[in-house]
Amino acid sequence: MTKSADQEHAPPSSSFPAYVFEGPAQVAIRTRTNDQPKYVDTRLSVWTWYDGGTAMKIDWAALHLNPNLMQIAKAFVAYALEKYAPVTAFKASGVFERLAESDISAKFPWTRQELVTTISAWAKFRESTIFLERFIAGPLMEEY
């Protein structure tokens, strides 16, 4: 017996346990100056970090994303803060603001067609498309 394409890519049932971001309370960031905070407090609803005196932030409470996606997004941004320059992490976080404005923001996981439609609408937002690809293909998504 073979499964149809819809069955293979159907969202998991709601009985699966949801991922909850339980990363470090403070994420160390790569800062260029000694007078800036070197950590981001991940317990707050607004994560703020600095690069060369410029504040960058992501307000999780203001984003209207599916709760499961929100938790995975937090893990992705925490990873970006640890691994990339502060401005690169900020650009990576921007993909979630763009997603919050899209038709797929309230649902997760997505079908391939929903992703293709969303990415097609982002043609003029190359950076967001690149970070969305990294988010989808990254190790965090393999665990979900």
Image: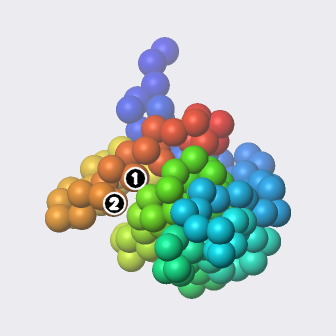
What percent of the width, then of the height, locates residue 91?
41, 64
- On screen, residue 45 versus residue 130, left or right, reads right
Q: Residue at x 77, y 49 (%)?
A: 17
- Which residue does the numbered mark 2 point to in the structure image? 128
Q: Is residue 129 depicted above or below 37 in this figure?
A: above
What percent of the width, then of the height, locates residue 133?
38, 46
Q: Residue furthest bottom?
A: 62
Q: Is residue 56 visible?
A: no
- On screen, residue 111 versus residue 47, left or right, reads left
Query: Element at badge 1?
Result: helix
Q: Residue at x 72, y 59 (%)?
A: 27
Q: Is residue 129 visible?
A: yes
Q: Mark 1: few, some, or many residues within 10 Å (few <14, many ≥20)? A: many
Task: Give the camera-side residue of 2 and 49.
Answer: 49
Query: Element at badge 2?
Result: helix
Q: Quadrant of the C terminus?
A: top right
| Tag 1 near tag 2, CB within 8 Å | yes
- Which residue does the numbered mark 1 point to in the structure image? 132
Q: Is residue 11 depicted above or below 34 in this figure?
A: above
Task: Give the camera-side residue of 64 and 133.
Answer: 133
Q: Residue furthest front?
A: 34
Amino acid type shown at disc 1: Leu
Determine which quarter of the picture holds residue 30: bottom right
Q: Residue at x 58, y 62 (%)?
A: 31
- On screen, residue 75 versus residue 11, left or right, reads right
Task: Give the camera-side residue of 25 and 15.
Answer: 25
